[in-house]
Image (spheres, rainbow, N blue to C red):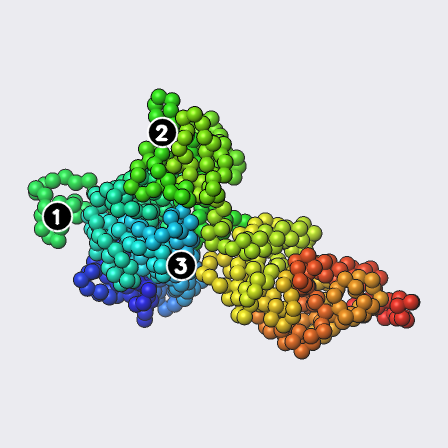
């Protein structure tokens, strides 16, 4: 089944039966809702993203089973959907997948199946994006050497539908040659680490060792563990992380040893409607999972058990939450159009701790790059429990524990490595480990995934878009701006208000085919094909596509089934349009096809055949496009064209007498 553990084949959900691993790779074919619920409860299908997608297909199965003569019994399908969502209460993805497909019920079973198939494809893109972001973060925070990473449970292709989340990051690190070894927790009581993760590690050729859960802390102390990477089944509004039982104790041990504890999960795992970890319903599983194994009793008959399937790690123990959008600063906040791809760090540095007698704790020895040396325990290894950021309304999140309502302040100086360092005092000869460690984390995370040039282009584009929005030329989500960088183009993402753009609301696409260079949930603007057509056919490094009112109105009068030109003569503003003549300019008008790539094809064909065409054009009823060597030049040309169109509207003339310029007479504007 390649990288995917789930497929839809001939009306059935086909998956790997995880109960048979590692001894047998057995295919499981699910055709009924009862079969699906049993598969989820018995862990034949497991992992938050995987059961979310499986739940989506389960609703499709319910709709197909309850359709007679083309009429769907919507009440029955809704009841079945509730049964599926209740199969496992802790993982939020299951209810999310069910609801997303159920919402398409009014459009019929075909629409529901299309939604489930899109979720399956989307999960692959999400996996890859989150895995790359997490791998970037690990390499940023950890020493520049082959790394040893500890992981828990299973977060690979068996737990998702593609490369995985935390294991996906391990696969990326392995492909980069940055991974020395993975230490795999066995993950009691059902051994998902031993049965599934070890199997996936071997399948991918990743060096690994298996350990018992209770040896993980000792591994951190003695085996040079550089970071802990885990997944999540639910992330609440305060940043608490519900994950497979045993995760909480790993976070505590990582805290003590000054090791990054990183959670990698899709956005769909974040549940901001649940306020805190205290509100999560933790599933309690059957006693026989603890009192015996493989059918052999290991405890006296009648022994009572405590067998939670999950635990909840409080946010102060979590170094970072990474999703397909990057490293989240506030994992409890709703993503908005303006900040959905914001890539900033999660925690602020904590206040200095004292040892009870007024003195500061001594830190662990640190490496040259400011990170703690492994094997040396930092007694003050506290991540921030008081340094919570504010909500968007200026109030503190419920998890904030600061007694004075303010973020902790740190007087710092720059260390030779470039990391902030606490100013030395009489009893502060050594650097504070936690401050050094979190200083590395709090450096611009944009550097983790983007080059400075891409980030700079994004800032310039966003600033220009906000200005043009204020002029009314990019109303709502209309219009788009791009900058060329070699063989790629940084362009505004689709569906975002141009008045709220940030430098992170961009997509990088290839000039040759307009496709994104990396997997991302963000989609490039629909008119991206117009931009790339210009870049392929004309010498330019920036393109502005806007909807100014006068130029757009004039283009309507010039609309035609084929490309035609509109001539302007005599206006001084012609000089600002970059044409060959300072007195006369013929600006092409392109038909506004519903198929936007066809517009791009028309533009490329025309510009290739007319190398002397001016760097401005109309699209009938669709605004104008201008380009230049810089964004400022492209913007200036768009402004000149709009101003000239306004003058033509006011005077009723596109061609006027210029006397000394040699043009005599004028032509009435037929529009």
- Horizontal placement of 337 versus 540: left or right? left
Front-most of residues 222 and 627: 222
Quarter occupied by residue 160: bottom left
The answer to whether residue 274 of the structure is visible from this angle is: no
Tag 2: Cα neighbours inside 10 Å, few (<14), some, or many (≥20)? many
The answer to whether residue 508 of the structure is visible from this angle is: yes
The residue that label 2 is drawn on is 361
In front: mark 3 or mark 2?
Answer: 2
Report the residue at 41% width, 30% height from top. Answer: 429
- Horizontal placement of 406 versus 203: left or right? right
- The answer to whether mark 1 and mark 2 are in CB contact below 8 A is no
Give residue 326's position: percent from left, percent from top. 45, 51
- Horizontal placement of 576 versus 118: left or right? right
Vertical comparison of 334 with 108: above or below: above
Tag 1: Cα neighbours inside 10 Å, few (<14), some, or many (≥20)? some
Give residue 493's position: percent from left, percent from top. 55, 57
Quarter occupied by residue 635: bottom right
In front: mark 1 or mark 2?
Answer: 2
Q: Earlier in the sequence, mark 1 or mark 2?
A: 1
Q: CA distance from mark 1 to mark 2?
A: 45 Å
In front: mark 3 or mark 1?
Answer: 3
Q: CA distance from mark 3 to mark 2?
A: 41 Å
Front-most of residues 610 and 558: 610
The residue that label 1 is drawn on is 292
Report the residue at 53% width, 37% height from top. Answer: 393
Q: Earlier in the sequence, mark 3 or mark 1?
A: 3
Report the residue at 65% width, 76% height from top. Answer: 608
User: Which label sits on residue 128?
Assistant: 3
Tag 3: Cα neighbours inside 10 Å, few (<14), some, or many (≥20)? many
């Amino acid at each position: 089944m390649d990288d995917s553990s789930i497929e839809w084949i001939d009306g059935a959900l086909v998956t790997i039966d995880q109960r048979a691993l590692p001894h047998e790779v057995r295919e499981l074919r699910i055709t009924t809702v009862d079969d699906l619920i049993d598969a989820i409860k018995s862990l034949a299908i497991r992992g938050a993203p995987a059961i979310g997608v499986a739940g989506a297909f389960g609703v499709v199965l319910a709709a197909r089973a309850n359709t007679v003569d083309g009429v769907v019994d919507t009440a029955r399908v809704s009841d079945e959907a509730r049964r599926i969502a209740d199969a496992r209460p802790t993982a939020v993805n299951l209810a999310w997948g069910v609801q997303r497909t159920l919402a398409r019920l009014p459009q019929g079973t075909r629409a529901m199946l299309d939604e489930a198939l899109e979720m399956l494809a989307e999960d692959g893109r999400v996996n890859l994006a989150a895995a790359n972001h997490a791998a970037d973060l690990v390499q940023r925070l950890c020493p520049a050497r082959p790394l040893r990473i500890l992981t828990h449970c299973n977060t690979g292709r068996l737990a998702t539908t593609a490369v995985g989340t935390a294991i996906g990051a391990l696969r990326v690190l392995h492909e980069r040659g940055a991974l020395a070894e993975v230490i795999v927790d066995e993950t009691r009581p059902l051994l998902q680490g031993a049965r599934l993760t070890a199997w996936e590690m071997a399948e991918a050729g990743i060096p690994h060792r298996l350990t018992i859960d209770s040896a993980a802390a000792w591994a951190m102390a003695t085996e040079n563990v550089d970071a802990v990477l885990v997944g999540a089944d639910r992330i609440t509004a305060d940043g608490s992380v519900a994950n497979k039982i045993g995760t909480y104790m790993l976070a505590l041990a990582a805290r003590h040893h000054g090791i990054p504890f990183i959670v990698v999960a899709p956005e769909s795992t974040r549940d901001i409607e649940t306020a805190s970890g205290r509100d999560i319903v933790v599933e309690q599983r059957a006693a026989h999972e603890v009192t015996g194994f493989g059918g052999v009793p290991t405890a006296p008959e009648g022994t009572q058990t405590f067998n939670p399937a999950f635990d909840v790690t409080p946010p102060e123990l979590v170094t970072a939450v990474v999703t397909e959008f990057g490293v989240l600063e506030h994992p409890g906040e709703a993503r908005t159009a303006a900040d959905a791809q914001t890539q900033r760090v999660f925690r602020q540095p904590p206040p200095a701790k004292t040892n009870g007698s007024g003195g500061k704790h001594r830190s662990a020895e640190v490496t040259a790059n400011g990170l703690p040396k492994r094997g040396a325990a930092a007694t003050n290894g506290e991540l921030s429990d008081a340094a919570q950021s504010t909500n968007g309304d200026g109030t503190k999140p419920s998890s904030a524990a600061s007694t004075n309502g303010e973020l902790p302040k740190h007087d710092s100086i720059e260390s030779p490595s470039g990391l902030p360092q606490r100013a030395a005092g009489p009893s502060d000869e050594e650097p504070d480990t936690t401050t050094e460690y979190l200083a590395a984390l709090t450096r611009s995370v944009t550097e983790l995934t983007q080059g400075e040039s891409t980030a700079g282009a994004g800032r310039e584009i966003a600033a220009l878009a906000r200005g043009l929005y204020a002029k009314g030329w990019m109303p709502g989500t209309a219009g788009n701006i791009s900058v060329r960088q070699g063989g790629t183009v940084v362009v505004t993402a689709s569906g975002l208000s141009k008045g709220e753009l940030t430098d992170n609301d961009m997509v990088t696409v290839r000039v040759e085919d307009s496709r994104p260079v990396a997997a991302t949930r963000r989609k490039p603007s629909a008119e991206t094909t117009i931009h790339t057509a210009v870049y392929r056919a004309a010498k330019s490094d920036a393109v502005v596509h806007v909807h100014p009112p006068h130029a757009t109105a004039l283009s309507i009068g010039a609309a035609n089934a084929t490309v035609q030109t509109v001539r302007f003569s005599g206006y001084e503003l012609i000089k600002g349009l970059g044409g060959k003549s300072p007195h006369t300019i013929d600006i092409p008008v392109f038909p506004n096809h519903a198929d936007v790539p066809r517009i791009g094809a028309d533009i490329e064909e025309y510009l290739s055949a007319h190398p002397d065409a001016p760097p401005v054009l109309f699209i009938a009823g669709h605004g104008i496009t201008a380009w230049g060597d810089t964004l400022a030049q492209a913007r200036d040309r768009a402004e000149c064209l709009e101003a000239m169109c306004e003058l033509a509207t006011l005077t009723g003339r596109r061609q006027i007498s210029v006397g000394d310029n040699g043009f005599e007479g004028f032509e009435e504007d037929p529009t």
